[in-house]
DNA sequence: CTTGACGTTGACGCCGCGTCAACTTCTACC
DNA sequence: GGTAGAAGTTGACGCGGCGTCAACGTCAAG
């Protein structure tokens, strides 16, 4: 019951089963020039020999390593360990980068879930950790107008390049705006401060939509809890308290 | 110099710069119903207001978390922390799986590179660690014919389901074939054993193409090095030596 | 009125195949 | 010989998330 052809070649279905892939995959590899059959019959049917099956094995091993078919083609065509190493080294760089990326994402998402379950919000650092801060920075001044931003620009200029970049994210700018409001003496119910608190509410709402009551509670916690208060008051003393007072007004008016 | 329209809405270019995405992305989000502009002018131009920009911020935060646009749509439309948590939990499962997958791939590739640089080959366990062994197993008996496989099937049957699956991979089958050859007393230069060594040579060549000399050296090492010898001799005593002798013949004839 | 900078819609491309669809060919049985 | 069924063939679309090009409309500045 040997169904192998006398010349030792096998048809596409058998080749596919031998290697554990679909016949469609073999046709695909043929069409992109990665693996041609040993010969094609007058009827157009593909037939694979030992050499092709070995090449296929090689291809599949590399595929398991996550290499692209392009890369795989280069490796198997070269059949040179030095070339293989070079390609694999490239590939390894990408793999570790992906691994790290997913690790950071998973950690961030896990923390996000955690924060949501506690019914509270995240600190800026927690939310933005692992993100590319700069992507949220462009023309931030346009978002709130030049007014408040200009006020704090002098302090910003003194921070140096590194310091600026670390601080250039949305929430931190809200805090800066709060600090500016304090320095010029705006009241909690002033239009300027109310605009800031609207931004803050929107930011919090990205993951959790507080009611009037919970929003008041949250901002009160910013004052009571030392870890949160530091985040605000390190920019300007009284910032947390100003936010709490402004939030109370905002909650009554808008929520 | 305020270029913002009097109604507070901005055009697509400004919205894109504010959020740090391309205008093409905004059009895409509109076309898939993820984010519609506040209003569209008679000329077809899109205009975005505060609400849309906030929704966009929300979308982008979730995008940074690696969620699909479908998932993102579900989350932002629900605007319910419970729904958000459920989706994020699903998402986290996928993220950790991807992280682990890339970690395994990276480790395997790193070991592969290491082995290649040592100019030696990998052990079966090293190569196949992290792979799905079963994908290389299908109809392995067809590859070498029923002859040798049947010989060892009795032992196989006694291994139990778990044991079988662990051992069902290409290299291990070569070793099994070697063991069978020993039991029936085939000589190193017999056609049967030579076919086995051809398989072994092809397997080694998947990552490293030995010359006649290095192939002899490699198989000699299988005998000399205790770690390698165990891999062969645990199947049948003398398997490593048989492979070495057969490889010498093969190298002289074919390499 | 021209020029140039922006906007619009529509379409293709990427990657690795899965999955139809429509057709031909081989094998088996009557 | 006919006929059914299994398996082959090529060709095409689809998937995700946009980038990018084509072809064209619209607006402000000179």
Image (spheres, coloured by chain):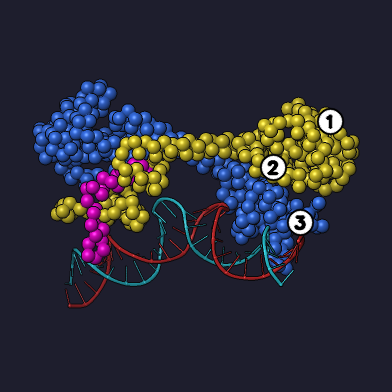
Chain colours: A yellow, B blue, C cyan, D red
Q: Which residue is mark 1?
A: A238
Total labels: the figure holds 3
Q: Are marks 2 and 3 on the same chain?
A: no
- Label 1 or label 2, whichever lies nearer to me, is 2
Segment tinted magenta in the rendering = A38-63
Q: Which residue is mark 3?
A: B9
Is residue B176 visible from the viewing direction of this image?
no
For the point 72% across and 40% down, which residue is it?
A: A170
Q: Mark number for residue A75?
A: none
Label 3: state its secondary structure: loop
Q: Mark number for residue A137?
A: 2
Chain under label 3?
A: B
Chain under label 2?
A: A
Query: In the picture provided, is A22 more to the left or to the right than B151?
Result: right
Within the image, what quadrant is residue A87 found in? top left
Decide: is A176 above or below C12: above
Q: Position of residue B86 (x, y in %)?
A: 60, 44
């Amino acid at each position: 019951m040997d169904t192998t052809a006398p010349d030792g070649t096998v048809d596409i279905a058998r080749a596919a089963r031998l290697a554990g892939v679909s016949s469609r995959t073999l046709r695909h590899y043929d069409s992109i020039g990665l693996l041609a059959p040993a010969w094609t019959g007058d009827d157009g049917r593909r037939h694979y020999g030992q050499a092709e099956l070995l090449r296929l094995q090689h291809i599949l091993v590399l595929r398991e390593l996550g290499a692209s078919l392009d890369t795989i083609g280069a490796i198997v065509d070269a059949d040179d360990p030095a070339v293989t190493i070079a390609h694999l080294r490239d590939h390894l760089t990408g793999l570790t980068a992906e691994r790290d990326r997913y690790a950071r994402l998973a950690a961030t998402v896990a923390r996000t879930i955690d924060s949501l379950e506690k019914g509270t919000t995240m600190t800026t650092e927690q939310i933005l950790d692992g993100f590319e801060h700069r992507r949220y920075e462009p023309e931030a001044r346009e978002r709130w107008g030049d007014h408040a931003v200009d006020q704090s620009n002098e302090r910003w200029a003194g921070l140096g390049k590194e310091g600026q970049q670390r601080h250039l994210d949305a929430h931190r700018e809200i805090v800066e705006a709060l600090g500016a409001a304090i320095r010029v003496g705006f009241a909690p119910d002033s239009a300027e401060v109310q605009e800031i608190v609207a931004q803050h509410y929107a930011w919090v709402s990205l993951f959790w939509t507080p009611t009037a009551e919970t929003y008041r509670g949250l901002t009160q916690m910013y004052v009571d809890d030392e870890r949160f208060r530091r985040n605000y008051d390190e920019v300007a003393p009284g910032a947390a308290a100003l936010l709490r007072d402004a939030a109370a007004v905002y909650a009554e008016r808008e929520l």
